Image (tube, helix red, strand yellow):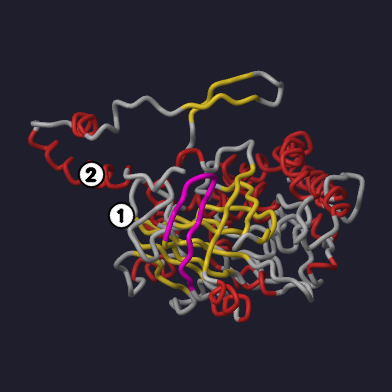
Amino acid sequence: MKKNSVVNYKKALATALCVLCASSLFSCGDIEKQLGMATQPPETQVVTDAQGDTVIVEKGPYDGLFDSGKVININITMAPTDRTAMLASPETEEYYNADVTVDGVECKNVGFRTRGNVSYVSTTEGDRFSYKINFGKYTDGTLNGLDELCLNNMAYDPSYIREYLTYTALEELGAPSPLSTFANVTVNGEFAGLYLAVESVDDSFLNRIYGNSDGTLYKAGRGSTLIGADTATFEVKNGDDVSMSQLRKMVSAMSDMTQLASCLDISGVLKYTAVNAVIANEDSYLGEKARNYYFYSQNGKLSMIPWDFNLAFGTDTSHRKDEYAIKTELVNADFKNPYFGALPEERPLVANILANEDYFAEYKQYVEKLTEFLEKLPEKVQPVKELIASHVKNDAKAFYAYELFENEFNASAENSMMGFVKKRAEALRTQLEGN
C-alpha cells in the first residue's frame, strides 16, 4: 500500500523558497523543478464515460480521491476498548487514535471521532453515526494533502444523494463547495455502511479554494442569526482574529451596501441563498436554526462557505429517520422570500442584500440557473443512482429499506425526492415567469 505523500513538505519548502523570486536569481518554476514538482506531467487515468467510450482524464485534488465514477473503501482500525467507549458516549465527540486506510492509502495514528447532532437521532437499534477523520490530529500527516475527512451517515436521506447533488448545484454557480464521494466504511472489520465522504472545511479546503489558509475561518453554530454584534455562536476554527473583529465589522456594515461590499463577497452570499431557497433546505442560515455555514476572512474581506445539506429537497425532520417524509408544502416556497421558519428581519444579512434592486436581480439569475439544474436533474441523476444502487442494496446498516431508495427516484411519487424536484422546478419556473 502507498504511504502518506511527502508532497506537502515539498509544497511548503517551495513556498518558503519563493521569496528568492524577488531577487531574480530564481523563478518559482525553477524552484518547483528542483523539487520535482512542476516538471512532472499531470497524473492521468483511463476511464470509461457514460457512452462507453474510453477516455483519458487528469486526476483531481488529493490524488483523485473525490473523482466521480467510483465508490471508495475506507477501513478504520482502533482499540476495541476505545470503540466501546465511542459507542457508549457518541455525543461527547471525543477523538480516539486509529489507523485508517482510504482507497488503498494507509494513514497511521490519526484522530477519529463521532460528529453531527443528527447522527444521534437514530433508530432504536442504530449505531450508524457520522464520523470525522483528522489525519493530522496526532502527527503532521495528511491524506495526499487532505487534512480532514467527514463521513456522513445519510441520516434522513434514503436517496443517499441529497448532499452530493447540492454540492454539484453549488459548483454550477461557481460557489466554494466541499468535494465529496461515496464510501463503504468498515470499523474494526465490521461494515458500518455506505457513507458520503466529504472534504472538511479546514486548511486543505482553504488552500484549494482560496490559494492559502492564512486568513481566519469562523464556523457558525446554531442561532448564528447575525443580529447585532453578538458573535457568541461562532467559533474561530483557525486564524488570528480571535476577537472576530472582521465578522463584527461586517455585521455593523449590513445596512449600507457600499460598506458591506467592501468587507464581504456579496455574490457568494447570494449563491448560498439561491441554493438553499431552490432546494428548500430548512437547515441553513435561512432556517429556524440559523446554522450550517462558515465565513473565511482573507485580506479584510469575508467569503461565505456552505455546509451540510443532508436535509435538502424538502425533508421533513419532524419524523424519526425511519418514518421518512417530504414536506410537500415546500414545493411552492417563494424564492423571493427565502426563509424557512424565520422572518426576514430575523435573517438581516440576506434580507438587507435582497432589498437592493441590483443584488436581487443577480440573485434571480442564480435562481434561474438552479431551476434549469433541477429541470435537467432526472437525466443527470441516473448515473449516480446506478453507481451506488448495488452498494445501497448491500448496506445492512441502512436506515431505510432498499425499496424506499428506489422510490426516491420515481418522479411520479409524491413522497419522493425526484417527485419533489419535479414539482419544485415547475413551481419555480412559474414564479420566475411571473416576475
Residue 188 picture quarter: bottom right
- Measure the alpha-carbon separation of dots 1 and 2: 19 Å
> Which span of residues is magenta-colored?
95-108
Name the residue type under label 1: Asn
Q: Taking 137 as reference, is 149 left or right?
A: right
Give, as a three-letter code, the residue at label 2. Thr
Q: Nearer the viewer, residue 115 or 83?
A: 83
- Residue marked by disc 2: 15
Q: Which residue is mark 1?
A: 299
Can residue 102 be spotted in the picture? yes
Q: Main secondary structure of the magenta part?
A: strand
Image point 77% across, 34% down: which residue? 379
Q: Give residue 374's position: percent from left, percent from top.
A: 74, 42
As drawn, is 362 to the left or to the right of 388? Answer: left
Disc 2 residue crowd, few under 14, some 14–19, many 20+, Cα 10 Å: some
Residue 138: percent from the left, percent from the top?
37, 66
Closest to the observer: 19 or 143?
143
Place of residue 166 in the rendered image (x, y in percent of width and height, measured from the top left) = 65, 49
Residue 337 in view, yes or no: no
Q: Is residue 56 magenta?
A: no
Percent position of residue 334, x then y: 74, 56
Q: Is residue 347 above or below residue 376?
A: below
Q: Does residue 213 appear to the left or right of 376 in the view shown?
A: left
Q: Residue at x 82, y 47 (%)?
A: 418
The residue shown at (62%, 42%) is: 365
Kind of element beneath mark 2? helix
Marks 1 and 2, the one that precedes in the sequence: 2
Secondary structure of the residue carrying numbered label 1: loop
